């Protein structure tokens, strides 16, 4: 969607209800603003930062079929056959979608022969491909039909109906997905349904925490908007997962900090980095 169309849509929907996309509260305060009509708001109940005007579920689905673009050369720009073969031959190592560090973390969390993973929001399959090569039993889900179809070139079957996902998995993984969703509670409930009792909900997303805002105010202002209607922060995750073990941080390269988590307590690491992550055992959390 062009900036002019986005601006016009914001004007036309400016007077729609300002309801939190997680808890539904109508009480919030404006903490940032773009182009007069678009605001970032803090929910007074759950502490989620969310954009107004909001998008409907129907608009969100259509948007990710036809209009979603990221200017990083790999997320939404599908590689040519030659480029893809080059990436696959290196297992994406050294590329912008190299998840070898994340794989190392997942293996440290679950030291077992076979780890069952759902890659929720798999895009065109670069993460699922690396998970599979690491020996994980992977299910892949993607809302975008064209990108899911492209996954066949990587030898993947990326499903587009989340009702087809099979439960009893060890990890419900989502990377830079939750900030796009029109209904955040839905992903928690879905993960809860599909995870084992001791399984992990693992999410990576742009960091909306105030520690990051203080350190990088210009980036904080940039990272929410048209394609990021939600801006997740550590306070929100603490409240959402208040009754279960979790680890929240913003620098997963510090492997020793993650390995130091005993997996049964609530622990918050430094949250001033660019990317927020949360590992949580959400099976017994009431949403």
Image (tube, grey):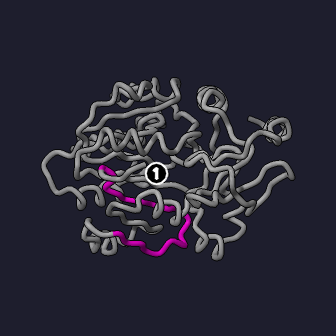
Split into 4 quadrants, where in the image is the N terminus? top right
Q: Is residue 265 magenta?
A: no
Q: Position of residue 268 (x, y in %)?
A: 42, 72
Q: Which residues are magenta?
A: 266-283
**Structural crowding at the residue carrying mark 1, measured as other residues with C-alpha within 10 Å and reported as few (<14), some (14–19) or many (≥20):** few
| Front residue of 155 and 162 | 162
| Front residue of 79 and 248 | 248
At numbered mark 1, what does the secondary structure look like: helix, strand or loop?
loop
Question: Which residue is under mark 1?
Answer: 95
Q: Residue furthest left?
A: 113
Q: Residue at x 59, y 57 (%)?
A: 48
- Kindly indicate the quadrant of the structure image that contains residue 194: top left
Q: Position of residue 62 (x, y in %)?
A: 63, 26
Q: Position of residue 100 (x, y in %)?
A: 34, 55
Q: Residue at x 37, y 72 (%)?
A: 267
| Left or right of 225, for residue 100 | left
């Amino acid at each position: 969607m062009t900036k002019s169309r986005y601006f016009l849509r914001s004007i036309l929907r400016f007077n729609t209800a300002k309801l939190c996309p997680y808890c539904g509260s109508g009480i919030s305060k404006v903490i940032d603003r773009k182009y007069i009509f678009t605001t970032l708001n803090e929910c007074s109940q759950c502490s989620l930062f969310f954009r107004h005007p909001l998008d409907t579920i129907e608009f969100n689905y259509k948007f990710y079929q036809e209009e979603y673009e990221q200017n990083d050369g790999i997320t939404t720009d599908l590689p040519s056959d030659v480029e893809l073969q080059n990436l696959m031959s290196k297992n994406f190592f050294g590329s912008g979608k190299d998840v070898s560090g994340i794989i190392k973390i997942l293996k440290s969390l679950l030291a077992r022969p076979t780890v069952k993973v759902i890659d929720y929001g798999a895009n065109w399959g670069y993460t699922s491909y690396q998970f599979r090569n690491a020996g994980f039993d992977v299910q892949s889900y993607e809302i975008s039909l064209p990108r899911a179809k492209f996954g066949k070139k990587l030898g993947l079957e990326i499903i587009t109906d989340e009702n087809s996902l099979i439960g009893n998995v060890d990890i419900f993984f989502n990377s830079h997905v939750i900030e796009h969703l029109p209904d955040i509670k839905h992903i928690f409930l879905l993960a809860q349904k599909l995870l084992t009792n001791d399984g992990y909900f693992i999410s990576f997303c742009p960091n909306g925490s105030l520690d990051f805002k203080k350190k990088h105010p210009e980036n904080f202002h940039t990272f929410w908007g048209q394609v990021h209607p939600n801006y997740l922060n550590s306070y929100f995750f603490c409240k959402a997962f208040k009754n279960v073990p979790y680890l929240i941080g913003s620098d997963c390269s510090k492997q020793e900090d993650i390995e130091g988590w005993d997996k049964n307590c609530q622990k918050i690491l430094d949250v001033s980095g660019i990317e927020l992550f949360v590992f949580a055992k959400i099976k017994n959390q009431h949403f």
